[in-house]
Image: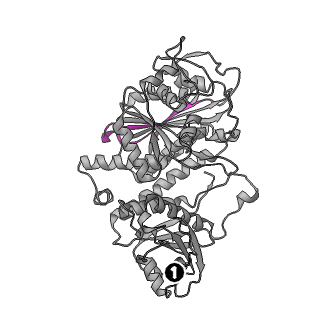
Amino acid sequence: MPSWRHSLEIIPAVGDAERLRTELLVIGVFSAGPMSGSARRLDEKTGGRLSSIVERGELGEAPGATLLLHHLPGAAAARTLLVSLGKPEAFSDRAYWRALAATARIIAESAVSEAVVTLAENEVPRRSLSWRVQQAGQHLADGGYSFVLPGAHSQARKTRSRPMRSIMLLVPETLTSGLVLALRQGIAVAEGIALAKDLGNLPGNICTPAFLADTARKMGKEFGLEVEVLERPDIEALGMGAFLLAGRGSANPCKLIVMQPQGRKGYGKPIVLVGKGMTADIGGTAAALDADPADVKFNMSGAGSVLGVLRTVARLGLAINVVGLIAAAENMPGGHSSRPGDVVTSMSGQTIEIRTQDAEGRLLLCDVLTYAERFKPACVIDVATLTEACVVALGSHASGLFANDEALAAELLRCGGVSGDRAWQLPIWDDDFGQLGSNLADTSNLGGRAAGAITAACFLARFAKAYPWAHLDIAGTASISGISKASTGRPVPLLAEFLISRAAEAAAAQGHLSPATMELHS
């Protein structure tokens, strides 16, 4: 993979931060009220200099504001980074995340090779120390990510002269097995995010359906996963007419990638994750006037996030049965492409009228949702950059969530809140299915301009009646646009939290919950 990597080690420890000789010491400070923990002890050791700085307003009040101090008199550290936690009465999950993000950014930009971070000692309302450690591990590990395209020159090729080697994460209590596990989980989630980012950031001429298949095979060899790649003749033999139509115009053949851990069938019915992998998307006729054409490379982000979270699951060795299905294709113009008005038969036997070539992603997904039935799943979650309508509705802060099972929807919403990778549920009502009507086929692939994200979900729901199902529309959250366009790696954190929680629940039900896991989820 082309992203910049170094052997960063994050080490959990218990100690007095003010006594540690380090290149960089990170201290969380509230903008008002008495100092506590490491901040109080460092303030005492420096003769009240920290409290004076805060009282004078030199450190901003907003959570995540920073102030870097060099050779603070009385401090053992060469540099001290003060990170604002905001007001004590307003301290929350989001304030903690902002402080972690600011810390990760400064560490990544600094010229130091090792640092000590104390942020996890600050109590967050309704959150455990294990949660704080897990989130710190994830954000600090993710903060070192930087994408450089192979063969690129110019400023993008610049690397740090002194790469960060280690971060000591101080905890205020005894270092338990549960805290070590929490840190390990956070780092594994960051590893999954990095893979999703890598795949999303690659241009479409590199990240093709074949490239996604090769990535899956390499993961299979590394972690002992079963990987099967169905080629165009296999897909045709299954009767996946909609899937084939979506990629018919490209010279690069479409592929259905099936991934599952070996020896996990004894863990019950599988959770099936379906990822949309449209690696190139220029076959449509109604280009968005305000969109950057280069952003279409992010249309495979659903596939990237599935691969990413499967890497997290494999790295942690979660005792859970998970199947990944990746629908990889290119939507390209050409003599074999679909035409508006065409009618195609899906794997389910339902016929679909093609009202637009811009709604091709749902054609990939509908056949894979039918294919998922063979696994007799506990639930199915599909992930796709499906509609601009979802971007209009929710922006870039929350992924759109649709489901035919309220318990599954509630579970995903909770996991989004815990992980900070939020989703917002939108309805699937019988009233909306009528917009997909056709006088030539069972349904059409477009419901018109009104409620576009909802009617897209309604289309998919027609093919997901055999099991509990949820759909995540990540069109607004999978990437950022503009000159700094980049993949965000979402919704890997949400999916990872969901699978980690499901694995812990399954272990508890079977009486196999380890002491470390029991502590983590207590």
Residues shaded magenta: 253-273
Residue 7 visible, this orientation: no
Task: Give the crowd class for mark 1: few <14, some 14-19, many >=20 residues within 10 Å.
Answer: many
Which residue lies at the image location 45% right of the left edge and 86% below the top edge?
44
Give the residue at the far left of this rendering.
Answer: 511
Relative to 318, 152 lies left or right: right
Q: How is the image coloured?
A: one colour
Relative to 200, 377 lies left or right: left
Report the quarter where the C terminus lies: bottom left
Could you say where residue 328 lies in the image, as x and y percent from the top left?
Answer: 57, 34
Q: Is residue 256 magenta?
A: yes
Q: Is residue 452 magenta?
A: no
Could you say where residue 275 lies in the image, as x and y percent from the top left?
Answer: 51, 37
Dot 1 corresponds to which residue?
Answer: 50
Residue 424 visible, this orientation: yes
Residue 338 image-quadrant placement: top right
Could you say where residue 377 lies in the image, as x and y percent from the top left?
Answer: 36, 33
Which residue lies at the image location 50% right of the left edge and 51% below the top edge?
192
Q: Is residue 33 above or below residue 404?
A: below
Could you say where residue 8 lies in the image, as x and y percent from the top left?
Answer: 53, 65
Residue 361 image-quadrant placement: top right
Give the residue at the far right of this rendering.
Answer: 154
Q: Is residue 286 above or below residue 40?
A: above
Which residue lies at the image location 44% right of the left edge and 27% below the top edge?
461
Q: Is residue 4 above or below residue 48?
A: above
Helix, strand or loop for disc 1: helix
Which residue lies at the image location 55% right of the left edge and 64% below the top edge?
102
Q: Nearer the viewer, residue 489 or 7?
A: 489
What amino acid type is highlighted by mark number 1?
A: Leu
Number of numbered labels in the structure image: 1
Q: Nearer the viewer, residue 481 or 151?
A: 481
